[in-house]
């Protein structure tokens, strides 16, 4: 049973691989009546695409999107929105040496173990390029939640051992957009950039942490006991390539805490119920409480590095070594930010539809 | 759209609340031909039930399970297995004061925000008692994966600031079963127990970390790009009450690492492909690689504490205070262990069925 | 992948077999705030249960239902509603001869071919008794759609070659309730009853047609292109045991017709758009048009008959003969009526939720 | 909740409308290792496309398909197969008069009632042209089931009052391919063609019946109690535009029958269990029994006719009249045959995967 469709009421199906003909997505379940243009989707893809700074891969994809269906007279009409991006700058020759020699840290071996074959060119569908589909779905989702004044923002809070200082929520988006690392703490951003460039020089790569915050989510979305909002966010975020950990609110810090210090107490701000602290990250009992939703993900260092690595030749079944060349990201965190926003936005739309905050037929 | 069914091919639907008539589960998708008895399920429920040591709540439930369907002549027959546990020791009077006053850290407020009402008695369906359903589903799942020599083990690795030392994988189950905390490091177990009892005396509670390891999972399960094995594990684990973080393999440590130090290289052990290290926790590209699968969860301190807490009266919409009395767990981690095992086992069965490692009709 | 859950937003999971411990259903996705009592469900089960007239089987089940969860202070609270009926009058001895000799027309052989085993007692889960689960789900669905003044009525329009005359829609429910056959045309009802009794005397059984009409369904439900309202109705109705055909509106008569004679033209009745005729049965392009929804099902003769029948002994793999004794329905159509109403009501609720006509959180 | 994805393990998502940019499908869940080329899909689309004879519409679409993903070195690689057909010969001007005036028998009104808007050009996504997506999915499904020697054949058995005589199963495909009507009875085919041409001359259209037979399906597929094989076939077939009735086996004839005459008795043919008759159409208790699966659908006359018809202006909310011009099919049955084959093939693959007859990872 394949797993290329996500969501229950807002369903996104993605397709395509790194060096195939095209990548894209079909977005089903978007209510009719939403203003949506090619540019809305292109803008998000531009934030994800490679080659925009010296700390990303130099693969020269412009990632121009074409909408095939679902828009009538400038608005969604309730039918599925299909969008496609053709691959233009694929260079498969660099991957020929890895045809039967799985690269450590990549899905080459596990995909082969499963399917008995593997499109080794550029990581095939295991490539980060498949997140083009996520971002298409997320672009539609973002337009929808904007109708309810919900905004989702991601920024980089850690690269290697460099950790950003806390920045007031209201400034994160603006500040993070000012540097290539997409870190809201400008001092840390500079150190992160240095770290990334030094790592790149060594032919190595480094991990980091990306935080995503959703502002304006109403209290009351999430479906216990299995489709809790935090459970679905964890699934969506852990499913992004290279992510190895997910925290909601204070996350692992709560393992060390006592309830007397971390139970978020209720108070009234005018007629609205709020919590004095937000250790829960806006979700209690699997349902949103109206406070900002906060999620952090651990991103592993991108596995494509230029040092010699040990592997096994799957054809001869002998141990061997490989050396990866090509154009790779020394730290994928900055480019993960729009993908994390997309993942969170899609989950939110799905739950807003499920809970009836957005009408499924038309807005 | 409600969320009380989980799984795609192995589908578990749970029902019931803390102080209602009964709790239970319907397990659909178990192949025919599996030896399954009431005792198989009861044994797992016994590991979850309260009142088994001085560090758990004293609510005196024996949690006796009855199987209503799905077993024919001692074996599963391919039809749904329904199992039910009647509540016997519910004391609802203690909860009367919280009827309109949501307890901080609990789902009382968010559930009310959603449904417009709330079964305030014992936490209603937001109670940890609903994990009886998880454990029923997990008991069937465990029997199934045992056919493939897969074993899932959970243990407590942290309580507050007390962290357990690493214990060789082969000993974890045995060692963890020797103490009430279910920590495989006996020295740490003692310190954890002291910590829990001290916290209990203060009327407070403390968080911790539970690690789950799955041994014997074949390479090749997991369904990219949305139903990756790690994504589904993250969803299942984050969905357990009180869990606020999930890590796979080295998790958040990878944020600080470089790929040259953490890429798990391949080698041959006889004819089997293995990795020299297991920073990935047995999952690469969303698919299992045949190494042990390792997941850790951050468990927040149980929110029921006896100190005075601020809240809002939902009827009068005025700020007020509450004091929670009753029988509560000062640290829920030990009792989370069988639930985490159940959650992981259900995900594994679902993916083993999806990938054809288990035949869906009959074993 | 098992198939004991139906519905997308209104999800009903059923369990249990003819001679097992119990049968029942878990209804997930019912909004909070609906008045619902045990009696609401019992009333529907009473219409389905056997032994209520001389034209049904004499198995003496009272089919008393118990609600295990989902009701708080007399109303649904948004959590799953589990309901159970214990088997009381099972007589398995009569089925011993068929242990390895599949009865023609029954699922005995096909279920064994699939699962490798079969609960031969009373048809196991292939028994019509499993529709207890349908009726439980339908009872909740009926209460929900009644909030929107939607009513679903089934009646028998044919038994063998006896066909009922058309009866004005407004009278069907009342008239059909006046006789054991549940046929609104009293003259035909008498002939049908005679036919059934004569067939019973011969140890034979006879088929028939059941028509279901849904009044008051708003225009705008149904989800093209795969989850059309008529498609989902066809699935739900064809899934009832013994059903071999489904028609919407004029059905197979339209195969002989021309569009000029059968296109339902539009006109205005006050401010409401209606059609001059209703050959479409209230559904056009897969979406309801506001006219009464009309579906008819072909019900085959119940396969349990007392004549000698040829079959194969699955153990010895030799041809053999069997003779079925016991208590059976000579015509199942009357007892199918509440099941057809349940099936249609569940589909309607699911689509009303999907289209936002009913809020998924609370009514 | 939108409904443009069908299937559980073999999941087909379709998109596109009659006069939009393109139509297509994403096929997810096809195992790796299947030889699949653009030509395999094109061949099926050619059988569906318009303009191939004088009894079909003259719209001049060549319906050339492009595969965007999912094929690696000539074989499926387990990733989603996206395929697209660009619209070339759309003439939207003819539809301008119907912008706010719904055509009787079409989905114009019901879609507007639902979504608040409607792509009136060529029927939008309510057009029969959306079955391009079905046929793409069906083409992949057919290649898969061919691996198990399963073959699905559709033919026209009735047009208006002209009914075909029974033709031996082994000859149906060959004979039906010899005439434009796709009727295996050559005499009837001639009469049908005359009937269609006469109807066309009058600017009218006529309905018919299409029968689909699946040969070689193993005993044991289908998932009671809700996902029975016949239930899923009924859903898939009823969901095809213009279909108003579905029968399995003897269908509505069984309503008039007695069990003694229609119970299919078992016998042995060598070591294989067969039934003496096949009134059940190869499905008993919701599961296949190894005999040919037989389904018939009632197809209504295509609603686009050139006579003046009454309707309502949705803008002014006044009664009005319309006259439809353009290029339409006087009888859609011949072009429904490949669509019915596709629908049945997709259901079969899904159930073969669900029951483990096809491995989900690779063939």
Image: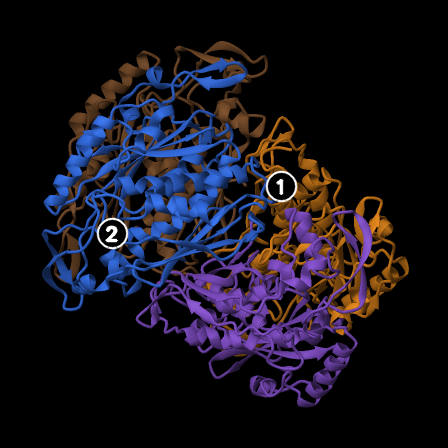
Chain colours: A blue, B brown, C orange, D purple
Residue A254 lies, with reference to residue C257, above or below; the image says above
Q: Which residue is mark 2?
A: B216
Q: Is residue D80 left or right of residue D163?
A: left
Residue C45 lies, with reference to residue C68, above or below; the image says below
Q: Chain of mark 1?
A: C
Q: Which residue is mark 1?
A: C356
Circle 1 — which element?
loop
A92 or A74: which is nearer to us? A74
Can you give x and y, in whole percent of width and height, for residue A119 in the image?
Answer: 28, 63
Residue B40 found in image quarter: top left
The answer to whether residue B236 is seen in the rendering is no
Residue located farthest toward the bottom when viewing the structure as drawn: D187
Tally the marks. 2
Residue A93 lies, with reference to residue A30, above or below; the image says below
Q: Is residue B67 left or right of residue D156?
A: left
Residue B333 found in image quarter: top left
D4 or A46: which is nearer to us? A46
Residue at 55% across / 60% down in the picture?
Answer: D20
- The tag on residue D238 is none
Which quadrant is the C terminus of chain A positioned in? Answer: top right
Can you give x and y, in whole percent of width and height, for residue A134 in the image?
Answer: 39, 48
Q: CA distance from mark 1 to mark 2?
A: 46 Å
Can you give x and y, in whole percent of width and height, for residue D191 in the image?
Answer: 73, 86
């Amino acid at each position: 049973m394949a797993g290329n469709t996500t969501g229950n009421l807002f369903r996104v199906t993605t397709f395509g691989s790194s060096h195939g003909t095209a990548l894209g997505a079909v977005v089903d379940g978007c209510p009719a009546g939403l203003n949506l243009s090619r540019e809305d989707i292109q803008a998000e893809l531009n934030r994800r695409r490679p080659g925009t700074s010296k700390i990303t891969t130099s693969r020269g994809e412009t990632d121009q999107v074409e909408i095939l269906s679902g828009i009538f007279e400038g608005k969604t009409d309730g039918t599925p929105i299909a969008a496609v991006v053709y691959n233009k700058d694929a260079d498969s020759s660099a991957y020929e040496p890895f045809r039967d020699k799985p690269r450590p840290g990549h899905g080459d071996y596990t995909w082969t173990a499963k399917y008995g074959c593997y499109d080794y060119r550029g990581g095939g569908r295991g490539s980060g390029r498949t997140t083009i589909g996520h971002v298409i779905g997320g672009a539609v989702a973002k337009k929808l939640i904007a109708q309810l004044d919900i905004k989702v923002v991601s920024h980089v809070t850690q690269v290697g051992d460099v950790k950003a200082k806390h920045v007031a929520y209201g400034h994160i988006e603006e500040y993070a957009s000012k540097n290539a690392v997409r870190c809201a703490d400008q001092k840390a951003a500079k150190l992160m950039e240095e770290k990334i460039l030094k790592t790149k020089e060594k032919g190595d790569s480094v991990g980091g942490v990306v935080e995503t915050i959703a502002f304006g989510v109403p209290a009351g979305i999430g479906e216990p006991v299995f489709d809790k909002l935090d459970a679905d966010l964890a699934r969506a975020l852990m499913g992004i390539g290279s992510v190895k950990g997910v925290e909601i609110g204070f996350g692992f810090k709560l393992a060390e805490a006592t309830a007397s210090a971390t139970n978020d107490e209720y108070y009234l701000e005018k007629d609205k119920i709020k919590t004095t602290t937000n250790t829960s990250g806006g979700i209690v009992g699997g349902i949103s409480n109206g406070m900002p939703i906060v999620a952090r993900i651990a991103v592993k260092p991108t596995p494509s590095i230029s040092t010699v690595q040990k592997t096994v030749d799957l054809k001869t079944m002998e141990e061997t070594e490989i050396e990866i060349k090509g154009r790779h990201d020394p730290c994928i965190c900055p480019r993960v930010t729009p993908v994390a926003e997309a993942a969170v936005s899609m989950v939110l739309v799905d739950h807003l539809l499920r809970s009836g905050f957005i009408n499924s037929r038309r807005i």
